[in-house]
Image (tube, grey):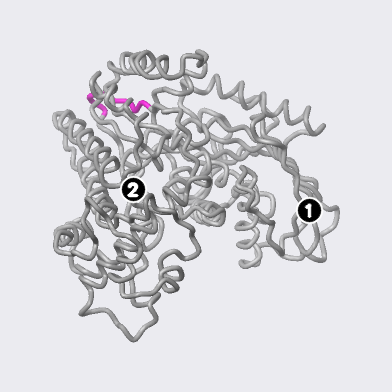
């Protein structure tokens, strides 16, 4: 049995069947055993623990977490493992101001070995854009927390050295949050190594530090990926809210008709760090522009103009929605703001957008204020110099409503007689989400034509998942149609576009999945994995 833990504490499983579905345990047992043996061969010592963090698939709620709205993902089987060994000082250190050596090897030869030194009281430099930035940033945010909370004290035995061996099965740039998997697993490992309460690590703490770690790498993430990775539950979708604090509600799909999600990787790599200024971060900025314009229009009679600009404007679109209709439910308040959009001419024509000069004029600010209050240190490069705040905010508001409708459908199902209608309705919401991502948020790509292939072969709902601009798609299908749809995707998409893929590469690119468990620490490596 797993070690007893409170609901908000990271799981400490004693067997792999507490981590994976039964169908996956055999293959995962071989993988974990191989990781341990490779660690021994690489470092000439045994690992002391393994930190695991899964990727995630977002079922619905794309590009709205950084606007403050709730999302609906699940954790998946592909994950990242960190096997670790720590050499401690024999005596408690008298100062936390000294260097500790870290060596990290990735089993994927595409990622070079990393070695760096750190002392807990200073930042580790990041910024090379490589995978190691996520690892180093996890050290920075975790140690900042431990020092500020006095968890890391002078009486603590600090490591002399730390050795990591990393194995990830979440494809980079696939839209399945490989970056969240590495930041989450790294945060978990660093907390376990340095904290005096090793067996009581709160999930909310791991999620918040992992979010901060990725943001420090230069991507303005909203928190969905890391939260799903931490809070995942087997066979459960997760409705995640971020306001006022992280709240996770597990949801079940109807048992009948039996359905499965298929994840299909377009094999078009979408790397947030590399393309943020033209894609991900640009969308964040466009949403900030829309929020500022809507605030000037909708809250002009309630805003306190005597305050500094950063105080008189809401922090995100959700806060604007709440301020506009404080006595309404969030879905109703969203709809009320959505209804006003055609009247807000300063958002621009959705077919043409706005250039920077028009935005500055509409906001009544200068370029210096735009840089300080809207960009906030981010660099963006809109195509043709055109921003589209109207389109982006329309997507965010309609997508936020779809998330609430999705949850409502799952919670209101009263009997199996309702199940067919529920499944068809949530599939319809997924299809509507894809149209909005494609037309209003413009984060799809031509290669996601696999969505059309899947829908024409029986998928009930298909949409991109993750940031978009490549990456993966997710498909809700009846169990009886799984094999047919996967084989059709292979023959009509993968074999046509990527004829040199091996059989295993095809399996890894397109697979059926159920929701899986979240991040965990495996601390007993003395018994065989099972």
| Residue at the image point whose x is 37% and y is 55% from the top | 385
Query: Would residue 62 be found to the left or right of residue 8 on screen?
Result: left
> Where residue 451 appears, x then y in whole percent?
30, 28
Question: In the rendered structure, which segment of residues is drawn in magenta?
Answer: 255-262
Q: Nearer the viewer, residue 394 or 466?
A: 394
Residue 71 shows which numbered tag?
2
Residue contact at pointers 2 and 1, CB within 8 angstroms:
no
Label 2 secondary element = loop
Q: Which residue is mark 1?
A: 100
Asked where in the image residue 365 lies, by quadrant, the reply is bottom left
- Residue 424: where, in percent of width, then height? 18, 31
Q: Is residue 385 left or right of residue 32?
A: left
Q: In the displayed structure, would residue 427 be above or below residue 162?
A: above
Label 2 or label 1, whichever comes before in sequence order: 2
Residue 384 is one of the magenta-drawn residues: no
* 396 is higher (above) or lower (below) than 154: above
Residue 191 visible at all? no
Q: Residues within 10 Å of mark 2 (few under 14, many from 20)?
A: many
The alpha-carbon separation of the residues under discs 2 and 1 comes to 39 Å
Give the residue at x 55% y 20%.
27
Quarter of the image with the N terminus is top right
Most extreme residue toward the right is 90
> In front here: 293 or 197?
293
């Amino acid at each position: 049995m797993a070690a007893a833990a409170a609901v908000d504490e990271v799981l400490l499983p004693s067997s792999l069947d507490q981590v994976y579905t039964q169908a996956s345990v055999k293959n995962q047992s071989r993988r974990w055993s191989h990781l341990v043996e490779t660690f021994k061969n690489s470092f000439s010592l045994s690992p002391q623990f393994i930190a695991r963090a899964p990727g995630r698939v977002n079922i619905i709620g794309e590009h709205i977490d950084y606007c403050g709205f709730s999302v609906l993902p699940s954790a998946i089987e592909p994950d990242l493992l960190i096997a670790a060994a720590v050499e401690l000082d024999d005596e408690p250190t008298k100062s936390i101001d000294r260097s500790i050596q870290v060596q990290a090897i990735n089993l994927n030869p595409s990622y070079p070995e990393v070695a760096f030194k750190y002392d807990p009281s200073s930042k580790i430099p990041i910024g090379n854009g490589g995978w190691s930035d996520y690892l180093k940033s996890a050290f920075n945010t975790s140690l900042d927390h431990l020092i500020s909370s006095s968890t890391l004290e002078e009486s603590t035995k600090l490591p002399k050295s730390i050795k990591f061996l990393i194995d990830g099965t979440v494809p980079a740039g696939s839209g399945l949050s490989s970056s969240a998997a590495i930041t989450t697993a790294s945060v978990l490992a660093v907390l376990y190594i340095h904290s005096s309460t090793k067996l009581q690590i709160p999930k909310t703490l791991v999620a918040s530090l992992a979010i901060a770690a990725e943001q420090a790498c230069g991507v303005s993430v909203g928190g969905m990926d890391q939260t799903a990775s931490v809070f995942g539950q087997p066979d459960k979708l997760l409705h995640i809210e971020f306001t006022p604090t992280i709240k996770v509600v597990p949801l079940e799909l109807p048992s009948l008709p039996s359905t499965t999600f298929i994840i299909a990787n377009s094999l078009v790599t979408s790397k947030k760090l590399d393309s943020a200024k033209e894609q991900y971060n640009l969308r964040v900025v466009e949403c900030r522009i829309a929020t500022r314009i809507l605030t000037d229009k909708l809250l002009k009679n309630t805003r306190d103009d005597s305050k500094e600009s950063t105080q008189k404007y809401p922090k995100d679109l959700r806060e604007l929605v709440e301020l506009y209709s404080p006595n309404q439910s969030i879905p109703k308040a969203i709809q009320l703001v959505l209804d006003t959009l055609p009247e807000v001419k300063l958002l621009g024509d959705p077919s043409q957008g706005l250039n920077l000069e028009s935005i500055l004029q509409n906001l009544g600010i200068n370029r210096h204020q735009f840089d300080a209050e809207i960009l906030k240190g981010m660099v963006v490069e809109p195509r043709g110099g055109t921003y589209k705040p109207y389109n982006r905010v329309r997507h965010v508001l309609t997508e936020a409503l779809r998330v609430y409708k999705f949850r409502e459908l799952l919670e209101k199902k009263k009997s199996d007689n309702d199940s067919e209608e529920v499944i068809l309705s949530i599939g319809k919401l997924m299809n509507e989400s894809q149209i909005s991502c494609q037309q209003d948020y413009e984060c799809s790509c031509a290669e996601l034509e696999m969505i059309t292939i899947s829908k024409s072969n029986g998928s009930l709902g298909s949409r991109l998942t993750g940031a978009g601009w490549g990456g993966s798609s997710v498909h809700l299908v009846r169990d009886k149609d799984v094999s047919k749809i996967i084989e059709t995707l292979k023959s009509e998409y993968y074999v046509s576009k990527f004829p040199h893929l091996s059989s295993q590469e095809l399996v890894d690119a397109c697979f059926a999945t159920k929701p899986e468990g979240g991040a965990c620490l495996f601390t007993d490596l003395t018994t065989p994995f099972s």
